[in-house]
Amino acid sequence: MKWVLSHLTDEVLCASIIEDLEYRFQQDRNIKWSFFRFIRFVFQSVITCFPLLIDKGFGGLAMFKNYIKITFRTIKKQKVYSFINIFGLAIGVGICIVIFLFMEYELGFDSHFHHKENICRVVTHINSPEGMEYEGCTPFPTAAALRNDFSELELATPVYRVSDAMISIDTDRFKETSLLFVNPQFFKFEGTEWILGEPEKSLDDPHSVILTERLALKYFGETEVMGRTLRLDNEFDLHVTGVVTNPPRRTSLPYDMLISWNLLNDYHGARSSLDDKWNFIDGDCLTFIRLPASVDPKYLEERFDAFEKKYMEPLYAEKWSFRLQPLKDIHFNPRYGSYNYVTSRITLFSFAAIGFLILLIACFNFINLTTAQAMKRAREMGMRKVLGAARVQLIRQLLGETSLFTFLAILTAIFLAWGFLPQLNQFLGNNTELRFVPSIGILVFLCSIYFFVSFLNGLYPSFVLSRYRPADALKQKIFSRGKSTYRLRNGLVLIQFIVSQILIVGMLVIAGQMKHLSRMDLGFRKEGMVTVRLPEYEEASCEALRSEWLKNPHIKNISFAWSAPTSRSNFDTPFVYESSGNLVRWQVCVKMCDKRYLDVYEIPLIAGKFFERNAGDESHKQWVVNEEVVRRMGFPDPWEAVGKRVNVNGLDGEIIGVIRDFHVYSLRSEIKPIVFFNFWPGNHNEAQIRMDMVEVRHTMDYIQNVWAAYYPDYLFERAFLDDFLKGLYESESKMLIMIQTASFLAILIGCLGLLGLVSFMVLQRTKEIGIRKVLGATVGSIYVIVSKEFLKWVVIASITAWPVAYLLSSKWLQEFAYRIRLNVGYFIAGGLISLGIALIVLSYQVIRAATANPVDSLRYE
């Protein structure tokens, strides 16, 4: 405190103030808590020092008020430039606020877990011929075996998700997508707050269920629901034994209903206990553990090898290995996935970098506009110096004006961000909820932005304007003809257009890739395809349902199958065949269907035959494979594969046909080996309907009415395949929109900066333009003379930005197996767009100056 006061006042007053503060501190001895005494002392010190700080920084409170008054007069006098300055800064700051809120939201995932720093998920690495595969799931018995074999574990619990279930309450039916099967140890991990029930006993009964507050109100209109009954998938009666508060949105384990783990075997209809299945992993079965703080996860991973050999068959123990993934990594690692959506850290910090660059562009724009207006304020600065103002006083005044501009810009940015958040939440989806709630984080961020922007924006203009000699300032002879005068301003505009050019090229590349994906042949018919969920498959009733549907002339064909060619309902399994006396293994994607599947999706058969029956049985196993399987088997002719016996999923059978390749996954992945079979008809849980797109609404009503007559106790669920395929590239579509928005804002702010530089140049060359007109120069020639000075910076910015844009675009395109070629056209188009925008901005100011009356121009100085 003494050091601070010594810099604010003289030695005598400093000693007096310190003595007074010490006396007040001693008088507060009756305050019980020393912490409150300290807070009171700090408060009194701040109150004492604030007037001294104002006096030291601004020459007194009266002078401070005068600076404020002058600033508002300047804003009123120069309305257009003041609006551009404030609005340009507000855009940059507003983007930073939104990005900060987004990052704060994402980085806060899973913060509600107890001892979150010690929680890990057990993940599985699978060594396959195609390379290492990564799964976030484990076999069902993993958690119980870990508890049994590793005494140092505090907790180990399994979690199983059901994302498509029907709940019945009397005659009401609901579709639910967030059901978890858990055991009581789950509540020791997750920070669950109980409204009703006991964590230790609520899941003892296999038919017990715990509802969230949201679901209890949805089903029963109240939370006092203990003992109430609901029905799961028209098969299991569940009794409510507890009600918990709604889990936070920012969680990797979202749920609305918790069901006893003891019911899972019955729910799966497993022939044997799932707790014995070590050679099978389900993507929805996760295992979580909690380690003591003293145990290193690496130490546990080193012992997993013996653990795997103990429980797994040698074939699986050799290829599968367990690893530990920290809880804090789940939301940010797309390699293993999550029950909730996943956000890449690279994406987060890319947005942060874009926000920072746009803020810098806005600051550069402010500096350009401020220095461009220097000529108009030169006489003011000269007069102040003549009247005795020191340079430091002028710097204080100009920094104060900048601070006020920044403050107004931040207020405007807060209102812009607050008004834009509802639309942003809807655009982001994923149940995202960004809220502008006052908190320590946002206040610190806004204060940091305020001081950073005020300092960056005010430092250069204040030093430039305050250094002019009074005589030159009063005559407005303050700008030399040398190129050094414009070096900084030209450099700032150059940086603005480099950033804008990178964003423009990125936007063009993403748009080109999305157009390329939309035009690619997927290998099957996608137009007019509708999938309808079936509660169960029974051949006679499903054939009757099919006949009834086909009575509608707009319905062309129907097949019953596990899923559409491209869907999320895929699973991989081992494919084994003998080649030259050796067993060769790899993973294949399995599809179950009836005999009409190829006709419905118009997939060509190129060798052999397809299934002759809708449903077979395990006594007569037959396989139909795609061309990729034939290539991997080493046969140049597809007919050579027909008749060969292979093992799929542990079952021996004969290949009877080969079909044309098609895409099972999105176009980020290459063609996968695929095997079709028809001897598990119980898995034909979808009707694949091909219809024409005439009177779609009436056709869909007809399909639903017929379906309801056969399955009156179930919910009708349908989906258009086109909509699903578009959803596969939703992240890219959103990225395109965000890049387009960022590009537009960067270009807008960059144009404002260019406008400032043009204004500066036109003001400086006013007399020159008048003389040229007197000597016969045309408007066009003047336009060329003035414009070429700026257009060369746009060309230099484009050439400088292209290598960076190429590297970033190439890295992004590597995520796609099928991608466009980065030819020079994208970069030339980006440069032409920047050049065209610059010409539009230049035209207004330059043509205005070129068409002005030469007499006025010659009188200007």
Image: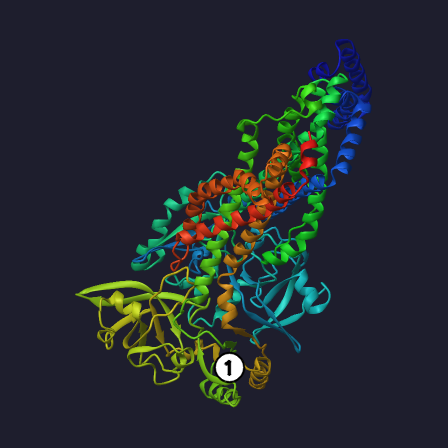
Residue found 39% across the figure and 67% down from its top: 663
Q: Position of residue 647 (x, y in %)?
A: 28, 70
Report the front residue among 3 and 677.
Answer: 3
Instruction: Report the residue marked by disc 1.
Output: 692
Residue found 59% across the figure and 76% down from its top: 715
Q: Residue furthest top?
A: 12
Residue found 42% across the figure and 47% down from its top: 806
Label 1 Cα neighbours within 10 Å, binned few <14 / some 14-19 / many ≥20: some
Report the front residue among 131 and 518.
Answer: 518
Report the front residue among 252 and 466.
Answer: 466
Task: Locate residue 591 relative to residue 434 in the image: left or right.
Answer: left
Is residue 722 in sight in this rendering? yes
Q: Which of the image's four quarters has the C terminus?
A: top right
Q: Residue furthest left?
A: 580
Q: Which of the image's four quarters has the N terminus?
A: top right
The answer to whether 574 is drawn above or below residue 756 in the figure is below
Q: Position of residue 736 (x, y in %)?
A: 52, 55
Report the front residue among 9 and 560.
Answer: 9
Q: Residue furthest front?
A: 775
Q: Position of residue 481 (x, y in %)?
A: 57, 27
Task: Locate residue 553 relative to residue 761 in the image: left or right.
Answer: left
Amino acid at pointer 1: Asp
